[in-house]
Amino acid sequence: MSQKPKEFFTSRLGLILSMLGVAIGAGNIWRFSRVVAQNGGGSFIIPWLIFLFIWSIPLIISEIALGKMVRRAPIGALAETAGRRFGWMGAFIALVTTGILFYYSIVVGWGARYFCYSLTGLLTTSTDHHALWQNFIHSFQPLYFHFGSILLGCFVIYKGVTKGIERSNKILMPTLFVIILIIAIRAVTLPGAWQGISYLFTPNFHDLLNYKVWLEALTQNAWDTGSGWGLLLVYAGYAHKKESVTVNGTLTALGNNTISLVMGIIIFSTAFALEQQAGIQELISGEGSTNTGLTFIYLPKLFQALPGGPFVHAAFASIFFLGFVFAAISSMISMLQLTSQVFNELGLSRNAAIALTGLLALLLGAPSALSMAIFENQDWVWSVGLIANGLFIAFGIIRFGANRFRKEAVNISPHDFKLGKFYNIFIGVLIPAQGLILLAWYFYQSIVHFDTDWWNPFRIYSLGTILFQWGLALILFITINKWMVKKTLLRD
């Protein structure tokens, strides 16, 4: 069933750091704290932790097990589990992640530009951070930084799994952890910091009766941990047979969510240090109410208001944005690897596949670099697609047989923690139920928000734009399914 990869991760540490590189990204920094603030603080943490164990960890374990079993990209993985008629599901999984790649590289570039702003002191001496952000995104600079991000990422995957991906993550991840530790120590020693920490970890049990808090907690897990992206599936294809599935998968999920919590501590400590309650109120309802607003408008204001002079402000901001870039680029590298491997398995040589991936990313990411409306539309369409990805992976395992998959793919490493039959319930019942509920919720919200215009494919957040873009892709993939599967499974 499986094909032997030409390369393997050289160590368990390299594999785990690379998997953490997949999971830990911009979402840990710019989305988690915003969603927590807008959904009751500590009240959000409880369902967020619950869904970690009933959505993220089961899916991550399943992806790793699937990758080790088939050692192929998503098209081959779904063809070998769900059956050859369903290779198009794997193509859709790859498309969703590739669609995210096309604008995610722009986020890497934003972080790099703001790191430069921080080094020069411009960021922390500016009197109008909103104008600074607007002037930047309405220039050609995001396009240039987008190009640089893609070229750097393609160079890393060109070097290969061991010399490129593993080696870079052995540098990026430990450095990121040190950066986060440094800014965390500074944040928790600010006046009023413990009020922010208390807000983060003290639940209001009345909020737990609000179903929206639970849906947002499930959404954060679906978007933040790397589950359902197909990225861990690809990386696991380069893992040695002896490598654990359940332990490595659980460590990846727990490591990711730990970073999210630490970033939450940093941001809430800093927010509460600013004029008592003013910081958190602005985080909930002001310019920090969007991902970009939180990171590039609101946080620079906080850095500027910290105790200490301009040098301290610039140093704090520089360290933060360097960590942001490291987190984002490690995830972007894995997306480039997935897309190029799909093209490679469809018949292109490895170098041609990398070149095509880079070219497509450069060209198709350019519109999002030049227009925030296009960026936000693509983020809406393909982020929701991650939920469908999780459903497709679960479908493949159900078709293969959840109990058979547990025995033949999950519980195969001799020193690994063995999962019991409860896994069958998680993958066969809980994952599909959660995914369907979440999709239905977002579709319903889009219809209610746009009323009679919900069908319009040219509205940024409409249901129509999702159905139009997904529909075109699914029609194409179903039409060429037989060809894709044949090329993928016959490639040696």
Image (spheres, helix red, strand yellow):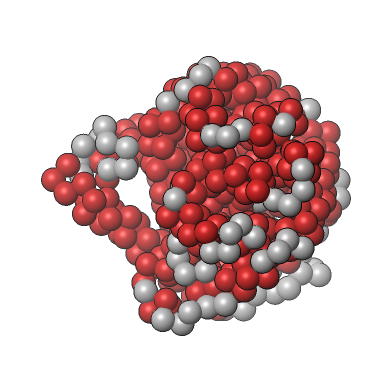
Residue 430 location, quadrant? bottom left
Name the outermost residue toward the right. Answer: 11
Q: Quadrant of residue 206?
A: bottom left
Residue 327 visible in the snapshot:
no
Left or right: residue 351 compared with residue 472: right
Using the rendered view, name the quadrant where residue 488 is placed.
Answer: top right
Is 266 placed above or below 205 here? above
Q: Is residue 1 above or below residue 436?
A: above
| Towards the viewer: 340 or 188 | 188
Going 71% across and 25% down the picture, which residue do you hit?
152
99 vs 474, left or right, is: right
Q: Position of residue 392 (x, y in %)?
A: 44, 53
Please indicate whether residue 164 sits to the left or right of residue 115 in the image.
right
Q: Residue furthest bottom?
A: 205
Q: Is residue 357 above or below residue 175?
A: above
Percent position of residue 483, x then y: 44, 31
Counting the numbered discs, the total is 0
Q: Residue at x 32, y 37 (%)?
A: 460
